[in-house]
Amino acid sequence: MTDLASLTATETAALVTRREVSARQVAEASLARIEARNPALNAIVQRMDAEALAAADAVDERLRRGEDAGPLAGVPVTIKVIADQAGHATTNGLRSQKDLIATEDNPVVAALRRAGAVIVGRTNTPAFSLRWFTRNGLHGATKNPLDAALTPGGSSGGAGAAVAAGMGAIAHGTDIAGSIRYPAYACGVHGLRPSLGRVAAFNPSGGDRLIGAQLMAVSGPLARSIPDLRLALQAMAAPDPRDAWYQPMPLQGPPAPRRVALVEAPDGMAVAAPVRAALQAAAETLRAAGYRVEPVQTPPWAEAMALQLRLWMAEFRHSNLAGLRAEDDPDANFVYAQMTRHCPEIDLHGLMDTLKSRARLTRLWRGFLADWPLVLCPVSGELAFPDQLDVASEAGFDRVLAAQMPLIATPFMGLPGLTVTTGRHGGAPVGVQLVADQFREDLLLAAGEVLAPSPIPAV
């Protein structure tokens, strides 16, 4: 008999829509998988079994009446605890927010519900969603289902672990500096950071965010197949007037030259041999599929990374410093101290100069992407880190930060990015990142499907 929890979202939606299996059967299989796998992983930190079964029954009833149940009919999904979901705490990994119960859904949650998705649980994040590792004083630590000695990534580490273990076919994540793309990389799945303005987002429980988060933070999907990312994006990219940055852009853009800029070491950064090998293999696969792939000099990465971190930290000091002290999370305290070492406080003039530089860098990058519509580059300069490396020492933190430049730089310009897992090196997953111009997720997904034509089995 088919293990329903191991199906892709695309397979599940097709079977449920044809009424070959019921949404309830799928939900029960997913909840059973959660029961079996989650205790060792701690990926899902808020279970919602009764709500999930009720949502599945509602999908089945719509289909029984001959109605359209949506493109994600009966598909089990998870939501990161950073996003408002009516009736549940928007904790963001904080003890101080354990009772912050949302009264309405974030737009991305509402969009997934309308698409017929069945939300089976809420996933873990580090305190303040501040790290590429996942541990906090409220929910505890999440483990990587491939290897507990490796980080599951962060900040959407619970999302990455959940989807890799088959506890949902699609996981919702958020990304301001790699928080979708890195957990996908570390857990051996795929993750899509959409363009600024593609997926509407707003947390009524927290109110409006400052300008840096408005410009750089996005919601997007993690999944075990590229078609599932495409399906998830279709559902997530629904209009919602609560997001002032939302743009109703088509999901399929005009034809573009099949040219790929190969960047093995952005701005000369250190890149481990297995990562370079994965990039070279991906380049050959794309060439065999008819893409022109060449080493090309791109606009700056290091400058974009430095400015992104400067803006991020300026906003953290403005909005979260009192909360950091009240929460007193040891990991967050250490990371903040290290970030302060790298990003001294700036004044109003520094803030204005940072935003001015963003316009220049965005213009440079978008001009480059007009000629080279895809960039093939590392996700990280290293394979997945040993868990908690960033808080082990100053040297550990600096090693992590230096390796993450390809994740940190591109959100500063609002660009979309895709992590594609392409294999393993020893016991660790390995993959590559693709970057495109704004609203060209279609180009990312088309190339991603060339690199990863088959679904990744759940572990």
Image: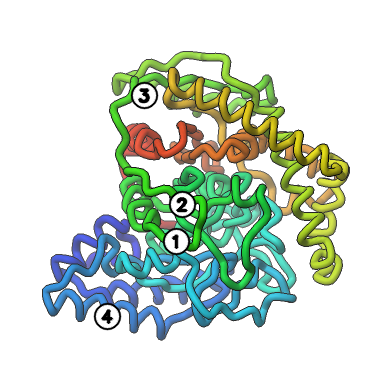
Report whether 117 appears left or right of 86: left
Place of residue 194 in the rendered image (x, y in percent of width and height, measured from the top left):
47, 45
| Quadrant into which the N terminus falls | bottom left
Q: Residue furthest left?
A: 66
Indicate which disc, 4 or 2, sits on the residue closer to the N terminus: 4
Q: Which residue is mark 4?
A: 58
281 in relation to 247, above or below: above
Q: What whole-number distance in Å separates the C-alpha atoms at marks 2 and 3?
A: 32 Å
Q: Amino acid at mark 1?
A: Pro
Tell me the crowding category of disc 1: few under 14, some 14 to 19, or many 20 or more residues within 10 angstroms, Cα based: few
Tell me the crowding category of disc 4: few under 14, some 14 to 19, or many 20 or more residues within 10 angstroms, Cα based: some
Q: Which residue is mark 2?
A: 246
Nearer to us in this view, 422 or 326: 326
Give the number of the disc on residue 241: 1
- Residue at figure coordinates x 65%, y 27% from the top left: 301
Residues under numbered marks 4 and 2 in contact, where contact means CB atoms less than 8 Å apart:
no
Indicate which disc, 1 or 2, sits on the residue closer to the N terminus: 1
Residues under numbered marks 3 and 4 in contact, where contact means CB atoms less than 8 Å apart:
no
Q: Which residue is mark 3?
A: 286
| Quadrant into which the C terminus falls | bottom left
